[in-house]
Amino acid sequence: MVIRSRRASRAVQPAGGPGGDRPADPPVPEPTAVAAAAEEVPDEPSAPPAGYLANALAAVVPLVIGAGGLALSLAMGLGSVTAPGPGLWPAIVCAGLVAMSVVLLVGGRRFHDAEALTSGTLPVLLAVATLLALVLAMPYVGFELPTVLVAFVWLKVLGREGWLLSTVVAVVLTAVLWLLFVQLFDVPLPHLI
């Protein structure tokens, strides 16, 4: 039900008003349900800001990883523009990682929007640890078993999905990746099948 004030009803009248002696008032906008709901929702609590030490640590870790990856990429050979070597794209990515890390390390004192590490950071650390385990296990047991396990952990533990859904999606995802990379693209991944 829409209730109009006298002022809003006058705005509907033709210019000049009923008597034609004064201009009509501009229409008064009515508040929408979305605007009213937005005013009622309290702000979510945010994590405390990270200090310079946390920003420096966040810059040093990728800097070391990028520098190590750049050294390995150079050892594999860059090739040329017309005949790129196996280390060209990893070198480009690692150089970008090193550059961004240096920017964060130098400008870290001015960055105040980074959040401090809290208990909410634990899922991110678990995700990184499972990816690291995947990479380390792959040469020994192939990519199928670690991929199933990582997908299952991400779905069940991090995503809090059910047992059946986590199991089915992990197996189907691994099968799709196997068909895509091993069969279709013939990528030399260590695999069991």
Image (cartoon, grey):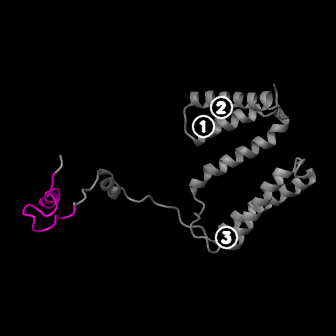
Query: Most prominent secondary structure in the magenta stretch?
Result: loop
Using the rendered view, name the quadrant where residue 172 is placed.
Answer: top right
Front position in the image: 74 or 165: 74
> Circle 2 — which element?
helix
Marks 1/2: CA distance? 8 Å
Residue at the image position 82 percent from the left and 50 percent from the top:
89
Residue at image mark 2: 170
Q: Residue furthest left?
A: 19
Residue at image mark 3: 53
Query: Of label 2 and label 3, which has the lower sequence position?
Result: 3
Residue range corresponding to the magenta coloring:
3-26
Assess whether mark 3 and mark 1 are in contact (beta carbons under 8 angstroms).
no
Would you say residue 10 sits in the magenta stretch? yes
For residue 32, above or below residue 60: above
Assess whether mark 2 and mark 1 are in contact (beta carbons under 8 angstroms).
yes
Residue at the image position 55 percent from the left and 32 percent from the top:
162
Query: Of label 1 and label 2, which has the lower sequence position?
Result: 1
Using the rendered view, name the quadrant where residue 51 is placed.
Answer: bottom right
Amino acid beneath label 2 = Ala
Instruction: Tell me the crowding category of disc 1: few under 14, some 14 to 19, or many 20 or more residues within 10 angstroms, Cα based.
Output: some
Query: Of label 1 and label 3, which has the lower sequence position?
Result: 3
Instruction: Tell me the crowding category of disc 3: few under 14, some 14 to 19, or many 20 or more residues within 10 angstroms, Cα based.
Output: few
Front position in the image: 73 or 138: 73
Residue at image mark 1: 155
Q: Nearer the viewer, mark 2 or mark 3?
A: 2
